[in-house]
Amino acid sequence: MNMKAIMIVFKKELTDLLRDKKTVIVGILIPLIIFPIMFGLIGRSVEGNIKKTSENLKIAIQSQDKSQLAVFLKSQKNITVVDSNDIKKDVQEGKIYVGLIIPQNIEESIKDEKSAEIKIIYDDTSQNSNMACNIIKSLIEEYSKEIVKSRLMSKGIDYSILTPINIKEEIAAKDEGGFGKFMLSLLLPLMLIIYGMTGPMAAATDLGAGEKERGTLEPLLTTQAGRMSLLFGKLLSITVMGFMGTVSSIIGLMIGVKAGGSVFGGDMPLLLSPITVIMIGIFVLLIIMVFGALELSISIYARSFKEAQTYLSPLTIIGMAGAYGTYMIDVKNVSTILFNVPLANVSLIIKEFIIGIYNPLHIGMTFGWNLVYIFLAVLFARYMFSKEEVIFRA
């Protein structure tokens, strides 16, 4: 294996990949653009719905008596009371968000210090209706507390008797941005693993099955560079393209989070320290190297570009399974055994880095296992690259 030959092949393959508009668009530009568009649309849509619902809460009230509750609700500045002949139908059709049916004897029940039952009609398939229902319920609870307060005061009882214990919250986190880091610990490992796996896929497919289709693989094998030099040159170029694709995906994700507004917590991209970014980058690079070698092996085996894409599709499911398997795990109470599980260990270590945990045992285990995976993946790629029946499979 000749290091000079490897670097020549690496530069040649990387130059060819960067010249290929399709590879650059699919691997780098699309991830960079798609997240800002997706998160921006989702964020603005959610914020628009929240604003639309909370600022103009359309409800219908059915009350035979002029109850004080109805008067209280009508007095709220963001509530619009709409006349309705069929509350249930109007809720289903979206003409109103919520309907209230207030019993005829509610004022007598309150006066006699009895309980009264109010029916709320809403559509559980409508986001606006669900949101409106929660707002109305909180307003009714507020009104109910005022009734309780007046009852106690009329009996000369201090209202504070209902709250013997007051809760004072204090956040134990060492620094600010706890919620943002929590959201990052959910999103970032998932995205990094998926794009660490899919990032090198386009390049691997092009440098294996793509070269077979174009008829450029055979001439390459006749050069002075040995097969192992060709293999490692291709692997290096695939790793670089995969890393570039992953970085562009994360940049797009961060821009998308910003574009999404307060729904996604716009301050999240500022929460990671340089050392955290570097540590995360190292482990993402390991994932890219593992999958880059596997994808090149599969691509070399395939007869055509289309066949390679078919073979590589199951890898996406494997990557998603590893990422989603740790999605809701709290790393502050995680078992060390999980750091022996492929992909799960990288997801967990990234979660630890995000919240500021640097456990030497976990780092060593994850790093060591991924070196083993890289070694095995490269051995597999070497085996595939050395088989004549695979290289010239048509």
Image: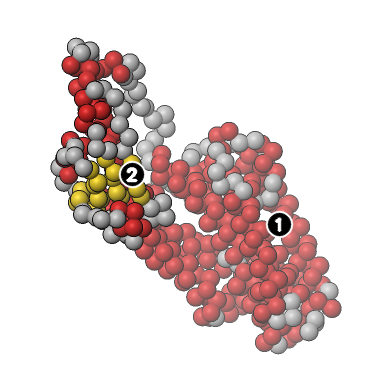
The image quadrant that residue 48 belongs to is bottom left
Kindly identify the amino acid type of the residue bearing the numbered disc 2: Ile
Q: Is residue 27 visible?
A: yes
Q: Residues within 10 Å of mark 1 (few under 14, many from 20)?
A: many
- Secondary structure under badge 2? strand
Kindly identify the amino acid type of the residue bearing the numbered disc 1: Ile
Q: Which mark is residue 120?
A: 2
Q: Confirm or deny contact between disc 1 and disc 2 (CB under 8 A).
A: no
- Secondary structure under badge 1? helix
Which residue is at a point 84% across and 78% down the rendered structure image? 389
Which residue is at a point 53% across and 62% down the rendered structure image? 246
Q: Is residue 254 left or right of residue 161?
A: right
Q: Is residue 55 visible?
A: no
Q: Residues within 10 Å of mark 2 (few under 14, many from 20)?
A: some
Q: Is residue 155 left or right of residue 389?
A: left
Q: Nearer the viewer, mark 1 or mark 2?
A: 2
Q: Which residue is mark 1?
A: 374
From what the image shows, is residue 46 above or below residue 137?
below
The span from disc 1 to disc 2 (Cα, nearest Å) is 59 Å
Q: Residue 103 versus residue 147: which sits nearer the camera? A: 103
Quadrant including the C terminus? bottom right
